[in-house]
Each structure stands twice: as C-alpha cells, then as structure tokens.
Amino acid sequence: MSFKEISAQLNAIGQCRKYGLSIWQCPQFLFLLMGLIIIVSALAIYAIGLRYVEEPEMVALIVLIISAILMAIAMIITRSFERLAEANRLKSEFVSVVSHQLRSPLSNLKWATELLMSGKITKVSEKQSEYFKILKENNDRMQNLISDLLTVSRIEQGRLPLQKKEISLLDLVKEIIKGLDVFAKASNVEVVFQPKDSLPKVLADPSQARLVIENILDNAIRYTKEKGKVEVTLTKKGKNLYFEVKDKGVGIPQEEQKYIFQKFFRSENVLRHQTEGSGLGLYIAKSIIEKSGGKIGFRSQENVGSTFWFSLPIK
C-alpha cells in the first residue's frame, strides 16, 4: 500500500463523507479511537506490570503481545464495519441510479396516457377511458415510490438539500388540507382544523415541510375508518410551533411501535386495512424534521387511533 493510500485510509473525515456517515459511525474514526485506547491501555498495563513483575523486559514483552492482539482485533472489526459501510454506500448509489433511470420513461408514459385520455388523437370510448385511468393511477403510484426512494437515497448519502427560510406553517397547513379535501371526502373522513390566529413563522424548507405534513395527514386519512374524523392542531409552545394530527383509525400495535420510523416498515394491522404504501413516508418525515432542528413523535393504541406530532423552531 502506497503512502497516498495509507493517508487516504487515515483521513477519517474524508472517509466519513464518502460513506455518508457521522463521525461516530465512521470505521476509520473508530479505528483511530481504538488505537488511542490501545495505546493508553498498553501504558497502563506497563505501569501496573512494573509494580508486580521484577523483570522490565518481561513486562515490555507482555505489553507488546497484548497490544498486538488488541490491534489485530481492532483491525478485523474496523474492516468488517468498512465493508458494511461500503455495501450500504453502493446500495444507496444503485437505488439512486435506478430511480433516476425509471423517472424518464414513467414521465413519458404519464404524458402519453394523459394525451390519449384527452381524446385529441382519437375518440376514446368509456371502456378505454377506464383502462387509461387505471394506467394513470398505477403510473402515479410508481412515480411517488420513485420520488420516495430518491429522497431516502439523498438522506442516506447526506445530500438532502434543506433551504431554510421563514415560512408560515399556518398557511402551509391550510393549503395542504385544501389539496387533500377530495381525497378526504372520497375516504368519507372529515378533517377538522381550528388554528389560533397570529402564529409566528418557523425556520424550515417549505418543500420539505410540505412533504412531512402531507405524509402525516395522508396516513391519518388513509387509515381512519369510514365516517371518521381527523383533528389537526397548530400551536405555539415555547420557542417552537407544535403541529399535531389525531385520528381514530386502526392504530399501531404496542409491540410494533418501536419500528414505526424505520424504512419500509408497515404494521400488520395496517397491511390488512390498506395494502398500498411503501413504508418510507415516516422515515423521510423524521429525517427532515430532525435535520430542520425539530422533534417528531407519536402516541398510538391499536383499534383506537394515533396522534402524530412534530415541532419546528420559531424563526
């Protein structure tokens, strides 16, 4: 191994950026940290050995043997972590590349389907229109999945852009609820929102904040039983704005609640109620809120309902 390669390996910060990991998760930093611990341990063992062993040479030999064993173990562990980090990086890159490649043909299919449905090329019968509608709905579902996969890939690689600025969360919530009105009525669910006036603005990325609110509200409507109600509140708590969505839906089993913010997770009772969904929405929401300096959480009881909330710092 050349000096340049050794220097690259020892460059913990550069390697962490390469793998998209925090400093405390980076294999190279952990190796350097373990090396420091081994050196301190060796000096401590040497100092203790001098008190109980008469021959300094024997003490030095024991210290060298123990240090060599510990260093070998540290190297093996670090190499294993490095291979896992590299596999994770390659996986994220693969997902990103495939998702980008799928976007173009799906977009072309969408425009072609809409053009055919418009009847501008040829007259479309009622039966054909139904088939085109099914095709369009499935295409939209695939595009949403691709969008979620790209967002997850950016999060894992530390490349999710957040352009923070002052935004009115109140106006954003009203706009999103209005946009989901057709979906709510089709699901026979009433969305109730009674905000307080003159709420302060928050510091967040408007597009990412929209994504979080849409994910939480969409889940609440989707998993609420017929003729149910979804209550939305937005209040000021200290130096944060507190957003909360309460539903009386299927709820989340107690034993599965610890997995709720993991990628691709969907609880068993949700799968019985609603087969659609990727299980990425809440993972994305948690990543965005935490990166924005806020907090996110939930309370839930199976067959009673769930309450999801997040807070964002006031400007």
Image: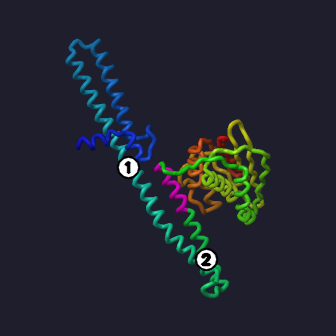
State the image coordinates of residue 24 (x, y, percent, origin top left). Answer: 44, 37
State the image coordinates of residue 166 (x, y, percent, origin top left). Answer: 65, 47
Q: Is residue 301 visible?
A: no
In the picture, the quarter occupied by the C terminus is top right
Q: Nearer the viewer, residue 40 or 51?
A: 40
90 within the magenta span: no
Badge 1 or badge 2: first in the primary sequence:
1
Mark 1 residue type: Glu
Instruction: Identify the residue under disc 2.
Output: 114
Q: Nearer the viewer, residue 309 or 225?
A: 309
Q: CA distance from mark 1 to mark 2?
A: 42 Å
Query: Helix, strand or loop at disc 2?
Result: helix
State the image coordinates of residue 185 (x, y, percent, origin top left). Answer: 75, 64
Q: How would you classify the magenta stretch by its main secondary structure?
A: helix
Q: Which residues are magenta?
A: 145-157
Is residue 238 found left or right of 26 in the rendered image?
A: right
Instruction: Identify the residue under disc 1.
Output: 86
